[in-house]
Amino acid sequence: MMTTMIAVRVSPARIGAVIGRNVGVMRSGPQYWLVLLSGFCEPLLYLLSIGVGVGALVGDLSVDGRTLPYAAFVAPAMLAVSAMNGALAETTINFFFKMKYQKTFDAVLATPVGPMEIALGELGWAMIRGSVYTAAFLVVMTAFGLVAPLWALAAFPATMLVGLAFGAAGMAVSTLIRGWPDFDMMNVTQFALFLFSGTFTPVQDYPAAIQVVVQVTPLYHAVGLVRDLCLGTPGWGSLGHAAYLAVLTAAGLAFAASRLRRKLLV
């Protein structure tokens, strides 16, 4: 990816200009702040209703030889979901609208900004949005005693990597979307990931064939990485999760930039 970035002469200033445009849009009206707030509230409500409410009925879980309160098991998963939602909100529907209907990127390409810089700028903005969610979520988790303050600091960069991975993947998928009905399939996929990626039950409880399917999905690795750090148990498996997300980021970004170049410059 680095070779590609150099070849197309990526400029940090032009990437910053793309991010700055999104910041300007956010500041232009209160409705965007409401959208921003909703993305934080959804996983928080799941945490309170399922992690705390249902957790009182479930009791403790035994995971990898450790006994955990159910809320401590679910909270890191909701944190990873928050990072995923924040990134995908910007790089799917918003990205598609700007590309196909608002023609924002056509206008941007009339300036010295190139397709890779658009992709990097949009990805950077998505990561900023996701990081706002996860930082606030980590404060809530710390206040509830679900993560130690030092491990919360360690988990924050991991949530940024999660945002990068899902943001890049979201942009790549958005360049393939034909119209709004296609988003129904994407929403179903996102919800299936949310339910079955080790968020509410240990993956080891699934049948072996289902475990294999789950373990190749990105949210499984995001939840695994964030949970390892929040519980203070990082290991070699955590590095595997991080490597998976890094590869997904590079592949998604390269694919999105290539598709943008083909769709907007041809």
Image (cartoon, helix red, strand yellow):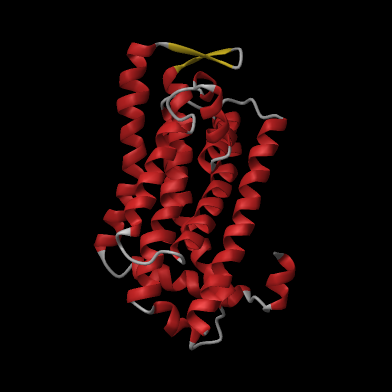
Coordinates of residue 75 in the picture (x, y in percent): 44, 29
Residue 8 in the image: above or below residue 39: below
| Point 52% across, 74% down: residue | 260
Res. 177 visible in picture: yes
Residue drawn at (68%, 31%) of the image: 237
110 and 197: which one is in front?
197
The residue furthest front is 209
Q: Position of residue 171 (x, y in %)?
A: 48, 62
Q: Is residue 192 above or below residue 123?
A: above
- Tell me the quadrant of the picture where the N terminus can be found: bottom right
Query: Of residues 2 and 181, which is closer to you in this image?
Result: 181
Q: Residue at x 64, y 44 (%)?
A: 244
Tell me what residue is drawn at x 51 percent, y 87 percent: 111
Q: Seen in the image, is 103 located left or right of residue 13?
A: left
Residue 14, by quadrant, is: bottom right
Coordinates of residue 63 in the picture (x, y in percent):
55, 17
Name the residue furthest right. 3
